[in-house]
Image: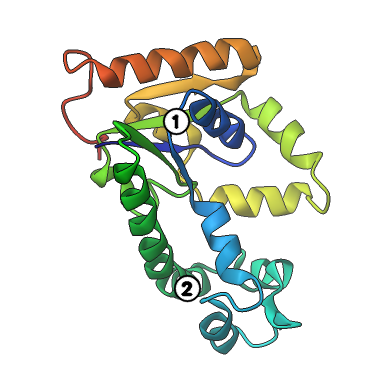
Amino acid sequence: MILIGLTGSIGMGKSTTAAMFRDAGVPVYDADAAVADLYVQGGAAVEPVGEAFPGVVKDGAIDREALRTAVLGQPEALQRLNAIVHPLVGRDRVHFFKAAEDAGAEMVVLDIPLLFETGGHANMDAVVVVTAPPEMQRERVLARPGMSPARLDAILAQQVADAEKRARAHFVVDTSKGLEPARARVAEIIAAMRDPARRPAAAAKD
């Protein structure tokens, strides 16, 4: 089964692009959604995260805003959180792979925001980076409730720069030109991955 890593900085249109792959019949694993499931009441991450970060559990679930405040701009705290969450997400991903294989999927997309940051790109047959001009990125993100320029800058500081992501990608989807050009690009990528002669020969560049 072919593994396609999908990533991109905040506000680039990654979720929209993931939906385009899904609409084209490619199973998509959403790492953010998997994490969200871990944080709800009864989720596997609630107890260990609550112990590591006192005060972030409210009504039996992780208060994501409180947790975000606890780790934003603090690399050591973020590493602590990742050490708890990543193994749990990994288990969930194994179930996704099995379901995709049982369904006869020829390829799957792994939608992972921090693909390069966590080294996950090394396990992919190809990496797709979603991009947009920085001014469009800021406009999109700052329109979100509770977002501020300072918070956006702190988030970007924890992510590999867009230019570096694009340089290390096998394929790039530019969402600044509208939905249909992006959808056409997704179709091109799927076709390329189905063709052994056009498929990337190695994992994304280090």
Q: Quadrant of residue 72?
A: bottom right
Q: Residue at x 75, y 46 (%)?
A: 149
Q: Write down the residue under mark 1.
A: 129
Q: Residue at x 36, y 27 (%)?
A: 167
Of the 4 image quadrants, the one containing the N terminus is top left
Which badge, 2 or 1, is on the more N-terminal residue?
2
- Relative placement, left or right, of 143 versus 8 is right
Q: Position of residue 44 (x, y in %)?
A: 51, 76
The local secondary structure at tag 1 comes to strand
Q: Which mark is residue 76?
A: 2
Of the 4 image quadrants, the one containing the C terminus is top left
Q: Quadrant of residue 181?
A: top right
Q: Nearer the viewer, residue 94 or 5?
A: 94
Q: Residues within 10 Å of mark 1 (few under 14, many from 20)?
A: many
Q: Residue at x 49, y 52 (%)?
A: 31
Residue 73: tell me if it is visible: no
The local secondary structure at tag 2 comes to helix
Question: In the rendered view, would you say 122 is above or below 198?
Answer: below
Q: Are marks 2 and 1 in contact (CB under 8 Å)?
A: no
Residue 74: tell me if it is visible: yes
Q: Disc 2 or disc 1, which is closer to the eye?
A: 1
Q: Residue at x 56, y 89 (%)?
A: 51
- Relative placement, left or right, of 71 versus 83 is right
Q: Which mark is residue 118?
A: none
Question: In the rendered view, would you say 177 is above or below 199?
Answer: above
| Residue type beneath disc 1 | Val
